[in-house]
Image (cartoon, rainbow, N blue to C red):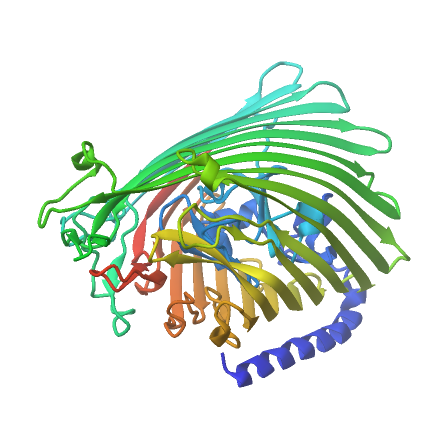
Amino acid sequence: MSRYNKIRFRKTLLASAVTLSCINYVHAQEQQQTVTDTIEKISVISRGRVESIQNVPDSVTAFSAERIEKSRITNFRDVANLTPNLSQLDNFRPGLARITIRGLITPQVGDPPLAFVVDGVTAPDLEFINQDLVDIERIEVMRGAQGALYGRGAIGGAVIVTTKKPIEDFEGKIKGSVGNGNTYNLNAVVSGSLNDENTAYFRAGGYIKDTDGLIKNTYTGDYADPLKEQSVFSQLEFELSEDTSINLKGKYTSSEAGFAYYQGVSDDTIEDFSINTSQNIINQDERDVYELSAKLTQHYDLGKFEFVTAYSNSENEHFYDGDYSADATFIDEDGFFRAPFGTEGLYDIESLTLESRFISQSDQAFRWSVSAFYQQRDRDTAVLFYDDFTDAEILTRADFANDEPYLSIIDNNSSDAWALAGQFNYDINEQLELTGAMRYDHDTRESFDPTNKDATYAKKSFSQLQPKVTLAYQMNDGLLLYTGYSRGFRSGGFNEPADGISRTFDKEISDSYEVGFKTALFNNKVTLNGAAFIIEQDDAQFTQFNIDTFTLENLSIDEVQTKGLELEAAFAATSNLSINLSAGIVDSEIKRFALRPELAGRPQFWVPEYNYGLSANHNLALNGEWSLFSRAELLIEGPKTFSIDIPDVESSRYTYLNAGAGLKSEQWSVQVYVDNLTDERAIEDIFILADGVTDLVRQPNKPRSYGIELSYQF
């Protein structure tokens, strides 16, 4: 990013803040007018209680059920595309997600840079994040360190997902679509009462996804990215009394997918997308995910008590072409080096979570909450390597059934974590609010190879106090100014047992400083929110592929500094047309890296310099029953680098266009859609393999997809 562009954006943000202060003051008296073309008012629970998003002194992007539907948001990546300084890239396999938020990245070994919370339950691992978003009431993205509110892992922010609740009236919805790649999707949900007294309710649904894929494996002649996924979910809610209720939830998801469709490239061909996937082993990933939770809510005169318990389990088996080529194995002269090979991964993750919260009443000047948290997680993994001596055969896992692996990397990794937290919001006067929060997290990690426990056993505890303080000034009904400081903490842990690697990686700490504003103009026809921030990271975690041991190794970059700007605007242009804009700019710099001092001064890897999103939704009434609707999205992502081993490899700027149009009535909706209309090709992942056969391997993005969708609700 050029220095000129940085300066221009800073000046624009500052000028907007000053100008809006004046404009808001002039228009403060116009709030009594009544108009229909206004921005949707969204209430959020980011700070633990229901508030208008425009009154929350934090950078929060929220997606209501209406916008989720209009924008065809079906997964976390769709959310990231429309959020400043948030991105998600496809990773090695479907259960993983490479997330960056405000310059903080996801190491492949370790935890993501944000907390992912669904109905009050914090996801224990990345495996539970990358699933379809179905039957969702609201999605909130808090940016900036949120450790004081959401604990370890919320080093860069938090995502709060609220699903739709069971209701008294019987209702339901069914939606189906067909698209290119022989793709079809079907999902359905029903809800209603279980008794005449309307004190027990249910909500149940599920979805099916099936596609042959869109990325060709030229060696096998088939597609490399097929997917078959099924999921069922249900909720039961019981009102035991006027003050007491219990909610029970369950979800099961099963999938089979092609994956690891990497392509062999060189320094000169990293963005030559005429190079295709060519592998002789048919890659397959099988995953089963189980999630159960129970929530007790009890109301008192003093406030509300909540107790949540959850069980999560993910079982994954995958097998793939470990050299990402169709060549045969060779052994070097010394007999120590082998490539290519087939690789098997076995992952079993199991977690138990307990959390209790007491939240005071909201209709008072001093509001407070306290909470206690416990989470136990076991993460057992095994990676097995097999020789592939064939020269031309197309193979599957079954062809290696009688073979002995020539190398095994096995790790039983556990986490035992607990935390105590408190928060207060105090109205100093009608315009000034002070927020303070504090959380102490303690996490004990263990790791060992069960085949050689005595020699590989490791145990260490990581803990951190995480404060947060925010001062907000409500200048008038339409303008909020705020500033704040917060600390985030990502637990340390252990790399897989192998000779020649650093066994332990340390905890990561981020200190975040932010100033921002939120404003509503012209009788809520326009909202404009902006923020500027600085983040100081110590021991920033980063994962590299160790080509000597064929293991993933987490490293710590001693100091990283990130500066950034964010702007979000919503404009109700007419009663039929709404426009949304999001813009994020990040200037991330490695300040000190003892292991690789020559990288000081370079940007943090995996962090795009900027991301912009512009979307428009239009609705035109045709008669008393039917209307015509359309949408368009323009998404721009800036350049980024990828790895400490190839620091000069940088992506281009990528531009994506999504669109859709259709007809809808009160019950029916039909639309045609296209994602990545211009068929923009991009790098999702790239790293150095250097196994004697393949130099660099690149994972491409998905090409253009399109289809037609039909839904009916009752």
Q: Pick out the residue farthest to the left.
A: 392
Q: Is residue 397 visible?
A: yes
At 9% from the left and 50% from the top, the residue drawn is 391
Q: Is residue 618 visible?
A: no
At 41% from the left and 38% from the top, the residue drawn is 381
Relative to 430, say whether 355 is above or below. above
Q: Pick out the residue farthest to the right.
A: 429
Taking the image as shown, residue 541 lies to the left or right of residue 199, namely left
Taking the image as shown, residue 270 lies to the left or right of residue 243, namely left
Q: How many marks?
A: 0
Give the percent coordinates (x, y) of residue 292: 54, 27
Please state which of residues 569 and 627 is positioned toward the viewer in this rendering. Answer: 569
Please state which of residues 265 and 445 is positioned toward the viewer in this rendering. Answer: 445
Taking the image as shown, residue 32 lies to the left or right of residue 114, namely right
Give the percent coordinates (x, y) of residue 594: 53, 69
At 66% from the left and 65% from the top, the residue drawn is 529
Relative to 685, say whether 266 is above or below. below
Give the percent coordinates (x, y) of residue 10: 63, 78
Relative to 353, say whether 338 is above or below. below
Relative to 669, say whether 266 is above or below. below
Q: Pick out the residue farthest to the bottom.
A: 4
Give the percent coordinates (x, y) of residue 1: 49, 78
At 24% from the left and 53% from the top, the residue drawn is 336
